Image (cartoon, rainbow, N blue to C red):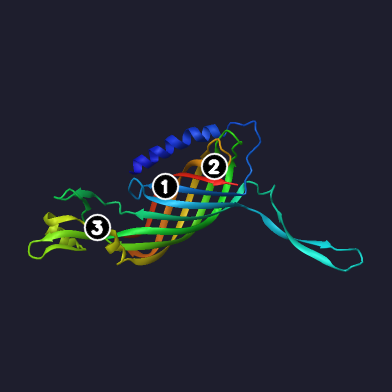
Amino acid sequence: MKKLIISLIFICISPLAVFAQFPVEEEDEYYEKEWALGIMMNTYGGTIGGASLRFSKKFFYEHKITESLGRNSGKTKVTRGRVGQIENERKYHSLSIEFLNIKHPKEERRQTYTGEGVVYGKMNRLYAIRPMFGKEWIIFKKARKQGVQMNVIVNAGPSIGLVTPYLIKYKDPQDGVITKQFTKQDFADYSSYIEGTGSFGESLSKASVVAGLALKASLSFEFGVNKRSITGIEAGIIADAYTQEVQIMASSDNRSFYSAMFLTFFFGGRK
């Protein structure tokens, strides 16, 4: 999976980065707000590793404007105005929320005698909910009807780790079909009797939460001919650091820090 992500990032970014450097004849696109919905692939594992929703707003400085209501009236009117439209035309605030499935590097899915896939040795699933705030800088601007826009995005924020037990459904020789969270010894004792996994709802009802911090740095490439809609890819690195070790596998090589490369395909709109 890691080699696949690296290959995709290289294939997608190389031609776009070259194309983005060509000058365009038409007037540059201007916008104040933008939103984008994305589907993520990452080296944490899985074809679809998560989803994201991002909102960007143009960076303005605000200041007070004091106006006199008459030379001899002694009264003034105070309003607020924006500055920085020219100085910061390539800078945006970025607010996003992401949902990721974090997998252990040693996870390996096997088929049971019923044909269902099960990760042997897994004790818990880890989902990361990440509300993040950061900055976005435009490196290359896109013309209204052609070209590619390249942005640098840096985000940080809390990482809310949702830990749900990985429930195994197996056929006990004496008690029939049982669903429970396996220990390392259970996988050794009942490996031949495993039928599959328990329901997501039952697992979610036994979830616990672990707090952490998240950091994300990426390059975003936007393209398309419609000035009010966007389509593109975002590639970079993500990291989650938790306050305690999260036991995903029954083995002892669990961790509190996870990092990965990612590739997100997104679409959205702007105004």
Q: Nearer the viewer, residue 246 or 82?
A: 82
Instruction: Inspect this view and state whether residue 73 appears.
Output: yes
Task: Indicate the secondary structure of the residue bearing disc 1.
Answer: strand
Quadrant of the rendering where the N terminus is positioned? top left
- Name the residue located 41 percent from the left edge and 59 percent from the top edge: 129
Earlier sequence position, callout 3 versus callout 1:
1
The residue indicated by pointer 2 is 229
Q: CA distance from mark 3 to mark 1?
A: 25 Å
Earlier sequence position, callout 1 versus callout 2:
1
Rendered view: 151 above or below 135: above
Rendered view: 127 above or below 221: below
Q: Alpha-carbon neighbours of circle 2 within 10 Å: few (<14), some, or many (≥20)?
A: some
Task: Indicate the secondary structure of the residue bearing disc 2.
Answer: strand
- Amino acid on which disc 2 is placed: Ser
- Amino acid on which disc 3 is placed: Lys
Question: Is 165 left, or right, of 146 in this rendering?
Answer: left
The mark closer to the camera, 3 or 1, is 1
Q: Position of residue 173 (x, y in %)?
A: 7, 62
Earlier sequence position, callout 3 versus callout 2:
3
Task: Indicate the secondary structure of the residue bearing disc 3.
Answer: loop
Label pair 3/1, CB-CB below 8 angstroms: no
Q: Which mark is residue 39?
A: 1
The residue indicated by pointer 3 is 122
Question: Is 163 left, or right, of 240 in this rendering?
Answer: left
Q: CA distance from mark 3 to mark 2?
A: 42 Å
- Amino acid on which disc 1 is placed: Ile
